[in-house]
Amino acid sequence: MDRSCSAEVELSFLESLVEAARLLFTSYQALWSVIGLTLQVTGTALAISAVIGIPFGAAIGLMRFTGRRLLVAVLYTGMGLPPVVVGLAVYLLFSRSGMLGGLGWLFTPTAMIVAQVIIAFPLVAGLTMAGIEAVDPDLRPQVRSLGASNVQVVRVMLAEARGGVLASILAGFGGIISEVGAAMLVGGNIAGQTRVLSTAIVLETRRGEFALAVAMGGILLSLAFGVNALLLNLDRRSIWRTRR
Amino acid sequence: MNAVAYALREVTQVYDGRRVLNVGDLTIQEGEILAIVGPNGAGKSTLLRLLNFLERPSHGELTYLGRRVEFPPSLEMRRQITMVFQRPILISSSVRENIAYPLRLRGAYKRDRVDMLLDQFGLARLATASCRKLSGGEYQRVALARALAASPRVLLLDEPTANLDPHNVGLIEAVVQSVRATGRTTQVLVTHNTFQAKRLADRVVMLLDGDVIESGDSERFFDDPQDPRTAAFIRGEMVY
Protein backbone atom coordinates (compact mmCIF):
# COMPACT_ATOMS: atom_id res chain seq x y z
CA MET A 1 0.00 0.00 0.00
CA ASP A 2 2.81 2.30 0.89
CA ARG A 3 4.49 1.49 -2.41
CA SER A 4 1.36 2.33 -4.46
CA CYS A 5 0.91 5.56 -2.53
CA SER A 6 4.51 6.50 -3.26
CA ALA A 7 4.01 5.68 -6.95
CA GLU A 8 0.97 7.91 -7.01
CA VAL A 9 2.89 10.80 -5.54
CA GLU A 10 5.74 10.23 -8.01
CA LEU A 11 3.30 10.17 -10.89
CA SER A 12 1.66 13.31 -9.62
CA PHE A 13 5.02 15.02 -9.31
CA LEU A 14 6.03 13.98 -12.83
CA GLU A 15 2.71 15.17 -14.18
CA SER A 16 3.24 18.43 -12.40
CA LEU A 17 6.62 18.86 -14.03
CA VAL A 18 5.20 18.17 -17.49
CA GLU A 19 2.35 20.56 -16.88
CA ALA A 20 4.75 23.13 -15.50
CA ALA A 21 6.86 22.95 -18.64
CA ARG A 22 3.74 23.27 -20.78
CA LEU A 23 2.61 26.31 -18.85
CA LEU A 24 5.96 27.97 -19.28
CA PHE A 25 5.80 27.65 -23.04
CA THR A 26 2.22 28.73 -23.43
CA SER A 27 0.84 32.18 -23.00
CA TYR A 28 -0.09 32.76 -19.39
CA GLN A 29 -0.49 36.46 -18.78
CA ALA A 30 -0.98 36.22 -15.02
CA LEU A 31 2.27 34.31 -14.67
CA TRP A 32 4.24 36.94 -16.56
CA SER A 33 2.64 39.62 -14.44
CA VAL A 34 3.77 37.79 -11.28
CA ILE A 35 7.31 37.40 -12.63
CA GLY A 36 7.44 41.06 -13.61
CA LEU A 37 6.27 42.23 -10.21
CA THR A 38 8.72 39.90 -8.44
CA LEU A 39 11.61 41.38 -10.39
CA GLN A 40 10.35 44.92 -9.86
CA VAL A 41 9.88 44.60 -6.09
CA THR A 42 13.02 42.57 -5.40
CA GLY A 43 15.16 44.57 -7.81
CA THR A 44 14.10 47.90 -6.32
CA ALA A 45 14.52 46.68 -2.75
CA LEU A 46 17.95 45.25 -3.54
CA ALA A 47 19.08 48.43 -5.29
CA ILE A 48 17.98 50.58 -2.33
CA SER A 49 19.62 48.19 0.13
CA ALA A 50 22.87 48.24 -1.84
CA VAL A 51 22.92 52.02 -2.24
CA ILE A 52 22.55 52.61 1.51
CA GLY A 53 23.94 49.33 2.83
CA ILE A 54 27.31 49.26 1.08
CA PRO A 55 28.45 52.76 2.18
CA PHE A 56 27.01 52.12 5.65
CA GLY A 57 28.85 48.80 5.97
CA ALA A 58 32.04 50.35 4.60
CA ALA A 59 31.83 53.21 7.10
CA ILE A 60 31.41 50.85 10.04
CA GLY A 61 34.21 48.66 8.74
CA LEU A 62 36.60 51.59 8.39
CA MET A 63 35.70 53.83 11.31
CA ARG A 64 36.25 53.42 15.03
CA PHE A 65 33.84 55.30 17.29
CA THR A 66 32.05 55.01 20.61
CA GLY A 67 29.12 52.64 20.38
CA ARG A 68 30.49 50.83 17.35
CA ARG A 69 30.34 47.43 18.98
CA LEU A 70 26.71 47.95 19.92
CA LEU A 71 25.93 49.02 16.36
CA VAL A 72 27.68 45.93 14.99
CA ALA A 73 25.69 43.73 17.37
CA VAL A 74 22.44 45.36 16.20
CA LEU A 75 23.49 44.88 12.59
CA TYR A 76 24.29 41.22 13.08
CA THR A 77 20.97 40.74 14.84
CA GLY A 78 19.30 42.37 11.86
CA MET A 79 20.91 39.81 9.58
CA GLY A 80 18.81 37.16 11.24
CA LEU A 81 15.52 39.05 11.29
CA PRO A 82 12.59 36.71 10.59
CA PRO A 83 10.82 38.11 7.49
CA VAL A 84 7.42 37.49 9.04
CA VAL A 85 8.35 39.69 12.02
CA VAL A 86 9.52 42.40 9.64
CA GLY A 87 6.24 42.00 7.76
CA LEU A 88 4.28 42.35 10.97
CA ALA A 89 6.17 45.51 11.96
CA VAL A 90 5.70 47.08 8.53
CA TYR A 91 2.05 46.01 8.56
CA LEU A 92 1.47 47.77 11.88
CA LEU A 93 3.39 50.81 10.65
CA PHE A 94 1.35 51.18 7.47
CA SER A 95 -2.01 49.99 8.81
CA ARG A 96 -4.71 52.60 9.07
CA SER A 97 -4.00 53.24 12.76
CA GLY A 98 -0.23 52.97 12.32
CA MET A 99 2.27 55.82 12.40
CA LEU A 100 2.50 55.93 8.60
CA GLY A 101 -1.03 54.75 7.91
CA GLY A 102 -1.83 58.01 6.18
CA LEU A 103 0.46 57.11 3.31
CA GLY A 104 -1.89 54.38 2.17
CA TRP A 105 0.96 52.06 1.29
CA LEU A 106 -0.39 48.88 2.89
CA PHE A 107 -1.11 46.15 0.32
CA THR A 108 0.92 47.93 -2.32
CA PRO A 109 4.27 47.00 -3.90
CA THR A 110 5.77 49.99 -2.08
CA ALA A 111 5.07 48.40 1.31
CA MET A 112 6.62 45.16 0.04
CA ILE A 113 9.71 47.06 -1.06
CA VAL A 114 9.98 48.73 2.36
CA ALA A 115 9.76 45.36 4.10
CA GLN A 116 12.32 43.80 1.78
CA VAL A 117 14.73 46.70 2.27
CA ILE A 118 14.51 46.13 6.03
CA ILE A 119 15.33 42.45 5.47
CA ALA A 120 18.13 42.98 2.93
CA PHE A 121 19.81 46.08 4.38
CA PRO A 122 21.44 44.38 7.41
CA LEU A 123 22.66 41.54 5.19
CA VAL A 124 24.25 43.94 2.69
CA ALA A 125 25.72 46.26 5.34
CA GLY A 126 26.89 43.49 7.66
CA LEU A 127 28.64 41.42 5.02
CA THR A 128 30.16 44.54 3.42
CA MET A 129 31.54 45.48 6.83
CA ALA A 130 32.95 41.99 7.30
CA GLY A 131 34.49 42.14 3.82
CA ILE A 132 36.15 45.49 4.55
CA GLU A 133 37.49 44.22 7.87
CA ALA A 134 39.03 41.23 6.10
CA VAL A 135 41.20 43.53 3.95
CA ASP A 136 44.73 43.96 5.30
CA PRO A 137 44.52 47.06 7.55
CA ASP A 138 47.98 48.16 6.40
CA LEU A 139 46.60 48.82 2.92
CA ARG A 140 44.82 51.96 4.11
CA PRO A 141 47.88 54.00 5.16
CA GLN A 142 49.70 52.73 2.10
CA VAL A 143 47.16 54.03 -0.40
CA ARG A 144 46.98 57.27 1.57
CA SER A 145 50.74 57.54 1.29
CA LEU A 146 50.38 57.20 -2.47
CA GLY A 147 48.12 60.24 -2.54
CA ALA A 148 44.62 58.83 -2.17
CA SER A 149 41.91 61.14 -0.89
CA ASN A 150 39.49 59.86 1.75
CA VAL A 151 36.95 58.93 -0.93
CA GLN A 152 39.63 57.15 -2.96
CA VAL A 153 40.69 55.22 0.14
CA VAL A 154 37.11 53.99 0.63
CA ARG A 155 36.89 53.05 -3.05
CA VAL A 156 40.05 51.00 -3.01
CA MET A 157 39.05 49.27 0.23
CA LEU A 158 35.69 48.37 -1.33
CA ALA A 159 37.43 47.16 -4.47
CA GLU A 160 39.75 44.98 -2.40
CA ALA A 161 36.75 43.70 -0.46
CA ARG A 162 34.74 43.11 -3.63
CA GLY A 163 34.30 39.42 -2.82
CA GLY A 164 32.60 40.36 0.44
CA VAL A 165 30.60 43.15 -1.19
CA LEU A 166 29.39 40.78 -3.89
CA ALA A 167 28.51 38.18 -1.27
CA SER A 168 26.54 40.86 0.59
CA ILE A 169 24.50 41.68 -2.51
CA LEU A 170 23.89 38.02 -3.27
CA ALA A 171 22.89 37.36 0.34
CA GLY A 172 20.53 40.34 0.26
CA PHE A 173 19.02 39.12 -2.99
CA GLY A 174 18.68 35.58 -1.68
CA GLY A 175 17.06 36.88 1.47
CA ILE A 176 14.27 38.70 -0.32
CA ILE A 177 13.60 36.95 -3.64
CA SER A 178 12.17 33.91 -1.91
CA GLU A 179 10.73 35.31 1.30
CA VAL A 180 7.02 34.81 1.83
CA GLY A 181 6.08 36.09 5.27
CA ALA A 182 6.60 39.81 4.79
CA ALA A 183 5.40 39.84 1.19
CA MET A 184 2.22 38.06 2.18
CA LEU A 185 1.52 40.24 5.21
CA VAL A 186 2.16 43.69 3.75
CA GLY A 187 1.32 42.90 0.12
CA GLY A 188 -1.76 40.79 0.71
CA ASN A 189 -1.06 38.60 -2.34
CA ILE A 190 -3.55 40.52 -4.47
CA ALA A 191 -3.72 39.19 -8.03
CA GLY A 192 -2.30 41.62 -10.55
CA GLN A 193 -1.24 44.03 -7.84
CA THR A 194 0.95 42.51 -5.14
CA ARG A 195 1.24 38.86 -6.09
CA VAL A 196 4.85 37.79 -6.43
CA LEU A 197 6.30 34.36 -7.17
CA SER A 198 6.82 33.28 -3.56
CA THR A 199 3.30 34.23 -2.43
CA ALA A 200 1.78 32.81 -5.62
CA ILE A 201 3.49 29.47 -4.97
CA VAL A 202 1.93 29.32 -1.51
CA LEU A 203 -1.49 30.17 -2.94
CA GLU A 204 -1.35 27.66 -5.79
CA THR A 205 -0.13 24.91 -3.46
CA ARG A 206 -3.03 25.56 -1.12
CA ARG A 207 -5.41 25.41 -4.06
CA GLY A 208 -3.95 22.09 -5.18
CA GLU A 209 -2.59 23.57 -8.41
CA PHE A 210 0.70 21.78 -7.99
CA ALA A 211 1.73 22.05 -11.62
CA LEU A 212 1.52 25.80 -11.54
CA ALA A 213 3.25 25.94 -8.16
CA VAL A 214 6.09 23.78 -9.45
CA ALA A 215 6.36 25.88 -12.59
CA MET A 216 6.66 29.03 -10.54
CA GLY A 217 9.12 27.33 -8.21
CA GLY A 218 11.26 26.53 -11.24
CA ILE A 219 11.05 30.11 -12.44
CA LEU A 220 12.00 31.39 -9.00
CA LEU A 221 15.02 29.11 -8.90
CA SER A 222 15.99 30.10 -12.44
CA LEU A 223 15.75 33.79 -11.57
CA ALA A 224 17.91 33.30 -8.49
CA PHE A 225 20.44 31.29 -10.47
CA GLY A 226 20.45 33.80 -13.33
CA VAL A 227 21.04 36.81 -11.08
CA ASN A 228 23.77 35.02 -9.13
CA ALA A 229 25.50 33.91 -12.32
CA LEU A 230 25.27 37.42 -13.76
CA LEU A 231 26.77 39.07 -10.68
CA LEU A 232 29.53 36.49 -10.37
CA ASN A 233 30.39 36.94 -14.03
CA LEU A 234 30.46 40.72 -13.66
CA ASP A 235 32.85 40.36 -10.72
CA ARG A 236 35.18 38.05 -12.65
CA ARG A 237 35.29 40.38 -15.63
CA SER A 238 35.92 43.44 -13.50
CA ILE A 239 39.00 42.07 -11.72
CA TRP A 240 41.47 43.68 -14.10
CA ARG A 241 39.34 46.57 -15.17
CA THR A 242 38.25 48.11 -11.90
CA ARG A 243 39.46 51.66 -11.68
CA ARG A 244 39.99 52.51 -8.07
CA MET B 1 72.90 75.26 -0.86
CA ASN B 2 69.72 73.18 -1.10
CA ALA B 3 66.45 74.35 0.37
CA VAL B 4 65.12 72.64 3.47
CA ALA B 5 62.56 69.91 2.82
CA TYR B 6 61.74 69.08 6.45
CA ALA B 7 62.57 70.66 9.77
CA LEU B 8 61.66 68.98 13.06
CA ARG B 9 61.93 70.92 16.31
CA GLU B 10 61.43 69.20 19.66
CA VAL B 11 59.18 66.61 18.04
CA THR B 12 58.05 63.76 20.26
CA GLN B 13 55.68 60.92 19.61
CA VAL B 14 53.92 59.15 22.43
CA TYR B 15 51.94 55.89 22.18
CA ASP B 16 49.85 54.90 25.21
CA GLY B 17 51.93 57.05 27.51
CA ARG B 18 55.19 55.63 26.17
CA ARG B 19 57.51 58.01 24.35
CA VAL B 20 58.74 56.29 21.20
CA LEU B 21 60.40 59.21 19.45
CA ASN B 22 62.16 62.34 20.61
CA VAL B 23 63.81 64.47 17.96
CA GLY B 24 65.31 67.71 19.25
CA ASP B 25 66.43 69.22 15.99
CA LEU B 26 66.53 67.56 12.59
CA THR B 27 66.70 69.13 9.17
CA ILE B 28 66.41 67.28 5.87
CA GLN B 29 67.67 69.05 2.76
CA GLU B 30 65.89 68.90 -0.57
CA GLY B 31 67.40 66.41 -3.01
CA GLU B 32 69.55 64.56 -0.48
CA ILE B 33 69.42 60.96 0.64
CA LEU B 34 69.12 60.76 4.41
CA ALA B 35 69.58 57.35 5.96
CA ILE B 36 68.02 56.61 9.32
CA VAL B 37 69.76 53.75 11.09
CA GLY B 38 69.32 52.09 14.42
CA PRO B 39 68.26 48.84 16.03
CA ASN B 40 64.70 47.53 16.17
CA GLY B 41 62.35 49.71 18.19
CA ALA B 42 64.52 52.79 17.79
CA GLY B 43 61.65 54.82 16.28
CA LYS B 44 62.78 54.77 12.66
CA SER B 45 59.44 53.77 11.14
CA THR B 46 57.61 56.17 13.45
CA LEU B 47 59.78 58.99 12.15
CA LEU B 48 58.96 58.01 8.56
CA ARG B 49 55.23 57.98 9.36
CA LEU B 50 55.54 61.51 10.76
CA LEU B 51 57.37 62.64 7.63
CA ASN B 52 54.55 61.12 5.57
CA PHE B 53 51.96 62.95 7.69
CA LEU B 54 50.29 59.65 8.51
CA GLU B 55 50.56 60.59 12.18
CA ARG B 56 50.37 63.88 14.02
CA PRO B 57 53.30 64.48 16.37
CA SER B 58 52.33 64.42 20.05
CA HIS B 59 54.46 67.54 20.63
CA GLY B 60 56.76 69.83 18.71
CA GLU B 61 56.87 71.47 15.34
CA LEU B 62 57.12 69.81 11.96
CA THR B 63 57.64 72.00 8.92
CA TYR B 64 57.63 70.95 5.29
CA LEU B 65 59.12 73.23 2.64
CA GLY B 66 59.16 76.05 5.16
CA ARG B 67 55.51 75.69 6.15
CA ARG B 68 54.36 74.37 9.48
CA VAL B 69 52.34 71.20 8.85
CA GLU B 70 48.76 71.47 10.05
CA PHE B 71 46.75 68.30 10.55
CA PRO B 72 45.03 67.03 8.55
CA PRO B 73 47.44 68.17 5.84
CA SER B 74 46.10 69.20 2.47
CA LEU B 75 45.76 66.58 -0.25
CA GLU B 76 48.01 68.66 -2.47
CA MET B 77 50.77 68.56 0.17
CA ARG B 78 50.31 64.84 0.84
CA ARG B 79 50.57 64.05 -2.84
CA GLN B 80 54.12 65.40 -2.98
CA ILE B 81 55.29 62.56 -0.74
CA THR B 82 55.14 58.81 -1.33
CA MET B 83 56.37 55.95 0.78
CA VAL B 84 57.43 52.34 0.34
CA PHE B 85 56.47 50.46 3.47
CA GLN B 86 58.47 47.76 5.21
CA ARG B 87 55.77 45.28 4.20
CA PRO B 88 54.33 46.79 1.03
CA ILE B 89 50.84 45.81 -0.05
CA LEU B 90 49.89 45.95 -3.70
CA ILE B 91 46.29 46.22 -4.81
CA SER B 92 44.70 43.09 -6.27
CA SER B 93 45.36 43.90 -9.88
CA SER B 94 48.05 43.64 -12.51
CA VAL B 95 51.59 44.96 -12.22
CA ARG B 96 50.78 47.68 -14.73
CA GLU B 97 47.68 48.80 -12.82
CA ASN B 98 49.62 48.96 -9.58
CA ILE B 99 52.27 51.19 -11.08
CA ALA B 100 49.59 53.31 -12.74
CA TYR B 101 47.63 53.62 -9.50
CA PRO B 102 49.19 56.86 -8.11
CA LEU B 103 48.80 58.47 -11.53
CA ARG B 104 45.14 57.46 -11.68
CA LEU B 105 44.60 58.87 -8.20
CA ARG B 106 45.82 62.21 -9.49
CA GLY B 107 43.89 61.96 -12.76
CA ALA B 108 47.24 62.05 -14.57
CA TYR B 109 47.60 58.58 -16.08
CA LYS B 110 50.27 58.45 -18.77
CA ARG B 111 50.89 55.13 -20.47
CA ASP B 112 54.41 56.17 -21.50
CA ARG B 113 55.35 56.86 -17.90
CA VAL B 114 54.15 53.43 -16.79
CA ASP B 115 55.95 51.74 -19.70
CA MET B 116 59.15 53.55 -18.79
CA LEU B 117 58.93 52.39 -15.17
CA LEU B 118 58.13 48.83 -16.23
CA ASP B 119 61.32 48.83 -18.29
CA GLN B 120 63.43 50.56 -15.65
CA PHE B 121 62.46 48.01 -13.02
CA GLY B 122 62.73 44.97 -15.30
CA LEU B 123 59.00 44.33 -15.05
CA ALA B 124 57.92 44.73 -18.69
CA ARG B 125 57.33 41.02 -19.23
CA LEU B 126 55.18 40.94 -16.08
CA ALA B 127 53.07 43.97 -16.98
CA THR B 128 49.81 42.05 -17.20
CA ALA B 129 50.63 39.51 -14.50
CA SER B 130 48.67 39.41 -11.28
CA CYS B 131 50.56 40.83 -8.33
CA ARG B 132 49.60 37.75 -6.36
CA LYS B 133 51.97 35.70 -8.48
CA LEU B 134 55.11 37.78 -8.04
CA SER B 135 58.27 36.75 -6.21
CA GLY B 136 59.43 38.79 -3.21
CA GLY B 137 61.92 40.76 -5.28
CA GLU B 138 59.42 41.48 -8.05
CA TYR B 139 56.82 42.52 -5.50
CA GLN B 140 59.22 44.98 -3.89
CA ARG B 141 60.23 46.39 -7.27
CA VAL B 142 56.59 47.00 -8.16
CA ALA B 143 56.12 48.76 -4.82
CA LEU B 144 59.06 51.07 -5.51
CA ALA B 145 58.01 51.70 -9.11
CA ARG B 146 54.52 52.55 -7.84
CA ALA B 147 55.93 55.01 -5.31
CA LEU B 148 57.96 56.72 -8.03
CA ALA B 149 55.20 56.79 -10.65
CA ALA B 150 53.89 60.23 -9.75
CA SER B 151 57.41 61.72 -9.56
CA PRO B 152 57.18 62.58 -5.85
CA ARG B 153 59.10 65.42 -4.31
CA VAL B 154 59.88 63.20 -1.33
CA LEU B 155 60.35 59.42 -1.37
CA LEU B 156 60.28 57.62 1.97
CA LEU B 157 61.74 54.12 2.02
CA ASP B 158 61.22 51.83 4.98
CA GLU B 159 63.66 48.91 4.72
CA PRO B 160 63.13 48.64 0.95
CA THR B 161 65.60 45.81 0.48
CA ALA B 162 64.95 43.71 3.58
CA ASN B 163 64.96 39.99 2.76
CA LEU B 164 65.87 40.51 -0.90
CA ASP B 165 68.60 38.71 -2.82
CA PRO B 166 71.71 40.64 -3.94
CA HIS B 167 70.39 41.05 -7.49
CA ASN B 168 67.22 42.79 -6.33
CA VAL B 169 69.11 44.81 -3.72
CA GLY B 170 71.45 46.03 -6.46
CA LEU B 171 68.56 46.90 -8.73
CA ILE B 172 66.72 48.90 -6.08
CA GLU B 173 69.88 50.70 -4.94
CA ALA B 174 70.59 51.62 -8.56
CA VAL B 175 67.14 53.17 -8.83
CA VAL B 176 67.62 55.11 -5.59
CA GLN B 177 70.90 56.47 -6.93
CA SER B 178 69.38 57.37 -10.29
CA VAL B 179 66.60 59.26 -8.52
CA ARG B 180 69.22 61.08 -6.49
CA ALA B 181 71.01 62.06 -9.70
CA THR B 182 67.96 63.97 -10.87
CA GLY B 183 68.26 66.17 -7.77
CA ARG B 184 64.51 66.68 -7.69
CA THR B 185 63.52 64.10 -5.12
CA THR B 186 64.44 64.02 -1.45
CA GLN B 187 64.86 60.47 -0.19
CA VAL B 188 64.69 59.27 3.39
CA LEU B 189 65.85 55.68 3.80
CA VAL B 190 65.32 53.57 6.87
CA THR B 191 67.71 50.65 6.94
CA HIS B 192 69.35 48.19 9.29
CA ASN B 193 72.11 47.72 6.79
CA THR B 194 74.93 50.11 7.62
CA PHE B 195 76.76 49.15 4.43
CA GLN B 196 73.74 50.16 2.41
CA ALA B 197 73.48 53.44 4.30
CA LYS B 198 77.15 54.10 3.55
CA ARG B 199 76.70 53.26 -0.14
CA LEU B 200 73.63 55.41 -0.68
CA ALA B 201 73.26 58.18 1.86
CA ASP B 202 74.53 61.74 1.85
CA ARG B 203 73.81 62.02 5.56
CA VAL B 204 72.99 59.54 8.30
CA VAL B 205 70.95 59.79 11.48
CA MET B 206 71.33 57.26 14.26
CA LEU B 207 68.28 56.60 16.43
CA LEU B 208 68.34 54.70 19.68
CA ASP B 209 65.31 54.25 21.94
CA GLY B 210 63.58 57.08 20.11
CA ASP B 211 66.42 59.57 20.56
CA VAL B 212 68.70 60.96 17.86
CA ILE B 213 72.10 60.13 19.25
CA GLU B 214 74.17 61.18 16.27
CA SER B 215 73.81 62.61 12.79
CA GLY B 216 76.20 63.81 10.17
CA ASP B 217 77.60 63.44 6.70
CA SER B 218 77.84 59.84 5.65
CA GLU B 219 81.61 59.76 5.36
CA ARG B 220 82.22 61.35 8.76
CA PHE B 221 79.45 59.28 10.39
CA PHE B 222 81.00 55.99 9.38
CA ASP B 223 84.67 56.91 9.53
CA ASP B 224 84.67 58.93 12.70
CA PRO B 225 81.58 58.30 14.83
CA GLN B 226 81.42 60.61 17.84
CA ASP B 227 79.14 58.55 20.06
CA PRO B 228 80.41 55.18 21.34
CA ARG B 229 76.95 53.67 20.76
CA THR B 230 77.11 54.70 17.11
CA ALA B 231 80.54 53.16 16.84
CA ALA B 232 79.25 49.95 18.41
CA PHE B 233 76.31 49.86 16.01
CA ILE B 234 78.54 50.38 13.00
CA ARG B 235 80.85 47.61 14.16
CA GLY B 236 77.84 45.34 14.59
CA GLU B 237 78.45 45.03 18.31
CA MET B 238 75.18 46.52 19.49
CA VAL B 239 73.12 43.61 20.64
CA TYR B 240 69.35 44.06 21.22
Image (tube, coloured by chain):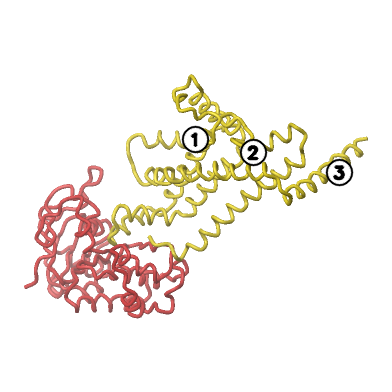
Protein chain holding label 1: A
Relative height, residue B217 to residue B76 (above, below): below
Protein chain holding label 2: A
How many residues crowd around disc 3 within 10 Å: few (fewer than 14), some, or many (20 or more)?
few
Which element carries disc 2, helix, strand or loop? Answer: helix
Relative height, residue B22 to residue B81 (above, below): above
Q: Tell me which label, 3 or 1, sits earlier in the chain.
A: 3
Which element carries disc 1, helix, strand or loop? Answer: helix
What colour do you see for chain A?
yellow
Kindly identify the residue that appears in the image at 12 percent across and 73 percent down. Answer: B220
Q: Which residue is mark 3?
A: A11
Residue placed furthest toward the top: A97
Q: Tell me which label, 2 or 1, sits earlier in the chain.
A: 1
How many residues crowd around disc 1 within 10 Å: few (fewer than 14), some, or many (20 or more)?
many
Relative placement, left or right, of A11 versus B196 is right
Residue B240 visible in the shown view: no
> What number is the disc on residue A216?
none
**Coordinates of residue A46 in the picture (x, y in percent):** 50, 44
Q: Quadrant of the N terminus of chain B?
A: bottom left
Q: Are marks 2 and 1 on the same chain?
A: yes
Place residue A180 in its image quadrant: top right
The alpha-carbon separation of the residues under discs 3 and 1 comes to 41 Å
Relative height, residue B121 to residue B215 (above, below): below
Residue A135 visible in the shown view: yes
Q: Which residue is mark 2?
A: A198
Residue type marked 3? Leu
Kindly identify the residue that appears in the image at 32 percent across and 39 percent down. Answer: A65
Q: Which residue is mark 1?
A: A114
Q: Which chain is red?
A: B
Kindly identify the residue that appears in the image at 35 percent across and 69 percent down. Answer: B99
**Coordinates of residue A22 in the picture (x, y in percent):** 77, 49
